[in-house]
């Protein structure tokens, strides 16, 4: 079953997630539920803390529309500063130009616990940076100017209140 997506600035989104140590059926189940939430929301990536679970795993979307999981990821290298339009399932309907790197080299474990290394650029590099930021306890809004950040914060607080009234939070 898909899990509800948590709205920023919920604490689980601003707290660094814990490393995954148990590569068993519970992790498989969590990943499946995250993928359902991701597809339901029509997103290109999702981190476990976006469904309220503080664990270091996420799904990343490739340009061909398929997804792969990254567990305990680390950025090894990045280069080529760029500014790209960015949005987030936890910050609905807000899109802002955000500073990122064009290329990124990462290592991560797959669901079997095997270490993988990946060099990516363009959109894939962008999604990787966004999801790894989530796992470190950061959302893209924190990379914007103070003014933009406070405007979005106000909107998200209103949204949270509205959701609460509908009994969804
Ligand atoms: Zn996000």
Image: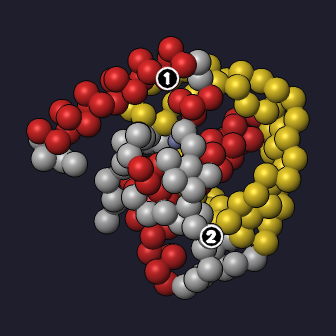
Q: Between 131 and 137, which is closer to the camera in this rendering? A: 137
Dot 1 beta carbon under 8 Å from ligand 1:
no
Q: Which residue is mark 2?
A: 19
Q: Nearer the viewer, residue 90 or 16?
A: 16
Relative image position of residue 2 (x, y in whole percent): 34, 60
Q: Which residue is mark 1?
A: 149
Q: Residue at x 65, y 66 (%)?
A: 71
Neighbour tally class for label 1: few under 14, some 14-19, many 20 plus, Cα within 10 Å: some
Quadrant for residue 57, please give it.
bottom right
Q: Quadrant of residue 52?
A: bottom left
In the image, residue 116 sits, relative to residue 119, either above or below, namely: below
Say which residue appears at 41% left-offset and 40% top-offset: 9
Q: Residue at x 66, y 79 (%)?
A: 112
Residue 86: x and y in percent read 58, 28
Q: Which mark is residue 37?
A: none
Vertical comparison of 57 with 88: above or below: below
Earlier residue among tags 1 and 2: 2
> Along the horizontal axis of the image, is 89 left or right of 112?
left
Label 2: element kind = loop
What is the secondary structure assignment of the residue under circle 1? helix
The reply to whether the residue tagged 2 has its Cβ within 8 angstroms of ligand 1 is no
Q: In this orientation, does residue 97 appear? A: yes
The residue located at (60%, 73%) in the rendering is 20
**Colouring scheme, one of rainbow, by chain, secondary structure, one colour:** secondary structure
Q: Give the image location of residue 142, x and y in percent.
A: 57, 31
Quick check: 83 left or right of 151?
right
Pick the residue in front: 167 or 61: 167
Label 2 packing within 10 angstroms: few (<14), some (14-19), many (20+): some
Viewer can see residue 60: no
């Amino acid at each position: 079953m898909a899990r509800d997506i948590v709205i920023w600035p919920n604490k689980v989104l601003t707290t660094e997630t814990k490393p995954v140590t148990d590569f068993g059926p519970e992790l498989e189940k969590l990943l499946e539920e995250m993928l359902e939430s991701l597809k339901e929301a029509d997103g290109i990536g999702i981190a476990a803390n976006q469904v309220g679970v503080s664990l270091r795993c996420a799904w990343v979307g490739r340009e061909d529309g398929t997804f792969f999981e990254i567990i305990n990821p680390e950025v090894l290298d990045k280069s080529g500063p760029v500014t790209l339009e960015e949005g987030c399932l936890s910050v609905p309907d807000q899109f802002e130009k955000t500073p990122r790197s064009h290329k990124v080299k990462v290592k991560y474990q797959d669901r079997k616990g095997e270490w993988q290394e990946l060099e990516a650029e363009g959109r894939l590099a962008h999604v990787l940076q966004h999801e790894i930021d989530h796992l470190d306890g950061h959302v893209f809004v924190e990379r914007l100017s103070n003014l933009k950040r406070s405007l979005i914060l106000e909107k998200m607080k209103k949204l949270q209140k509205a959701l609460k009234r509908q009994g969804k939070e």
